[in-house]
Amino acid sequence: MNSILDMRQFKYYLFLFTFIISCTIKPDANQLTLVLAGDPKNIDPAHATDVRSGQVTALMFDNLVHYGHGSEIIPGIAKSWSIVDNGKTYIFQLHDSVFFQNGELLNSSHIKSSFERILNPKVASRRSWLFKSVTGAKPFMKNEIESVSGFICSNDSTFTIKLEKPFAPFLGFLAMPSASIVNIINDKIIGTGPWIKTEWIRDGHFLFNANKHYFNGAPLLDKLKIRILPEALPRVAEFITGYLDIMEIPNAEYELWLKDPEWKDDIQLIDQLNTYYIGLNCSRPPFDNVSVRQAVNYAINVEEILSTIFSSRGQEAGGPIPPVLLERKENPIFGYNPEKAKKLLENAGYNNGFSVELWQSQSKELFQITEIIQDQLKQIGINVKIVRNDWNMYSDAVRKGIPDMYYRSWWADYPDPENFLAPLFESEVSKTRWTRYESSELDSLIIELQTETNSEIRFNIAQKANDKLMNDAPWIYLWHMQSAVVAQHNLKNWQPSVMFNAEKYNKVEKYIP
C-alpha cells in the first residue's frame, strides 16, 4: 500500500467483498478450488505456450517425464529410462496400465503420434523446436518423409528417441506442456491426466471431475474448480472466506499478509526460475564499451528496489542464471557502488555522462521500478528517458535493436542453465533479437553445455558461462524474483513447485474437523 489511506480503503473494500462472497458461495469439502488471473490462451498442448495454458493442460494431460517440486525430473508415463550411445539415444519403459480418459489403453504409438503432431507443419505448433534435434525431424517437417525415424516403437511399452547429436537438456524438454501425450478422437484431444474437464466458461471458471482411473493415483478429492479472477481484491476476499484453497499473494499486499497473525505462518516463498534485467544494446555507443556496461551495474541499488517494491522478496542477480541451477546459494554480484561507477565512466571517456532511452511496457508497477532506476543513473550523470509502449510495439523495437536499454524478464521453459544462455546470448540469436552481444568464447561454452552429459562437468561449464556474462555485462542484472503463496489451514499434502506445470493436485486432500 502506498499510504495509510490506501490500507484503510483496502481493508474496507475487502470487508465488503468478503461479506458479499460469504453470503453467496460456500467452501466445498470435496472440491479443490484454485484461481487464475485470466483465461489460458489455449488448452491444446501443441499450442500451450503461456504459463496459464501450461498450468491447465498439466491437469488433463501427462508426459513421459514430469518436473518434481524443484528442478528435478521424475517419472511420468515412463516408469524408467536409460540414456545410451553417448547421450544420443533415450529408451523409455512405459507403465503398463495407463488409460486415456475415454478408457483406451495407451501404448508407445500414441507417444510417437503425439510428438510427430508437434512437428507437423499443418498443426503449426510454436514448440516444434522441442524435437528439432531428433533424427528425421527436419525432413518430416518438410513433408519429405511420412514418419520421424528417430521416434521408435520397439513394442507397446518401449519407446525410443534417437537424436542427431547429444543434447543434454533434452530430457527436460519432454516434461514441457507441448510434449504431452494426446489421443485425437473425432477432433477431440484426450489426455491421461488426473482431472477430466467438464466445463470452461471464459472469464468465469473451469470445472473438472477426478479421473478415477489415473495411473499415478486417483485424485483424493472429487472435483477441481479454477476461478478466473483478474482483480486482486476478489481473489483475496474469496480466499479469506475459505472458498479459494490456494492463492498467490498480490505484490502490493504481501506486507499485510506477513503481519497477519492468522496467515503469516502459512506463507511459502518459491524461488522461481526467472531473471529480471535491463538489456543493453552492445552494438553502438555508449554500451559497446564494457566499462560503461559495468558502470551502470554498479550504479543500481538493487537491494533498495527489492526492499521498496517487493518487500525483499527476491535475490539480487549476479549473472543471468538463477543460483539454484548452478548449485550455488548465490552468485557473485556487482553490488551498489556509485563511486566505482563514476570512475569506470571517466576511464571510458564519459566524464560528463550521456543520455539514453530506457524502453518498457505499459505496466504501472514496472514504471515505479524504471523511475527508481532513472533516478539512480542520474546520480552518476546518465540522463534516462523512459519510453513506454504497448507490448507488441515494445517487443518489435527490441527485436530490431532500437532501444538503448530495455527492461525485461526471462522465465525458464525447462529447468536447465542452458535455457538462460542459448536463447538469450548465443551470438546469432543475440544479434537478431536481443542485446547484439557477441562472444565466440561464450558460444563455445554453450555448445559444451548442450553436449556434455556429466552433471558435475555441466555445472562447471554453466558457472563459467554465467561468470563471463557477469563480467561482460550485456545486461544490468537485477534480481531473481520469489513468489509468495498461501494455502488454507485444512489443506494437506500440498507444497508449491518451481515449474508452473508440475502441479497435478491428485495427492491433495482436505482435513475435515
Image (cartoon, rainbow, N blue to C red):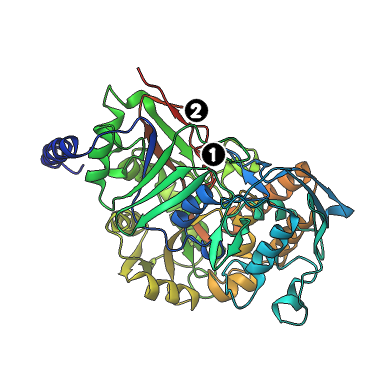
Instruction: Give the alpha-carbon distance from disc 1 to disc 2, as whole Å.
Output: 19 Å
Where does label 1 land, which residue?
A: 212
**Which element type, helix, strand or loop, lies under badge 2?**
loop
Q: Quadrant of the C terminus?
A: top left
Q: Position of residue 49 (x, y in %)?
A: 51, 62
Residue 379 at x, y percent in the picture: 33, 55
For marks 1 and 2, the one nearer the N-term is 1
Q: For the point 16% across and 41% down, which residue is it?
A: 17
- Asked if residue 244 can be seen in this view, the reply is yes
**Residue 429 in the image, given as x and y percentages of width and height:** 61, 71
Q: Which element carries disc 1, helix, strand or loop?
A: loop
Q: Amino acid at mark 2?
A: Asn
Which residue has dot 2 on it?
493
Q: Residues within 10 Å of mark 1 (few under 14, many from 20)?
A: some
Q: As rendered, which of 393 and 401 lies closer to the eye?
A: 393
Mark 1 or 2: the one toward you:
1
Q: Report if residue 313 is visible in the image.
A: no
Q: Residue at x 48, y 79 (%)?
A: 400
Q: How many marks?
A: 2
Q: Label 1 sits on what residue type?
A: Lys
Residue farthest to the front? Answer: 103
Residue 394 placement, left or right of 420: left
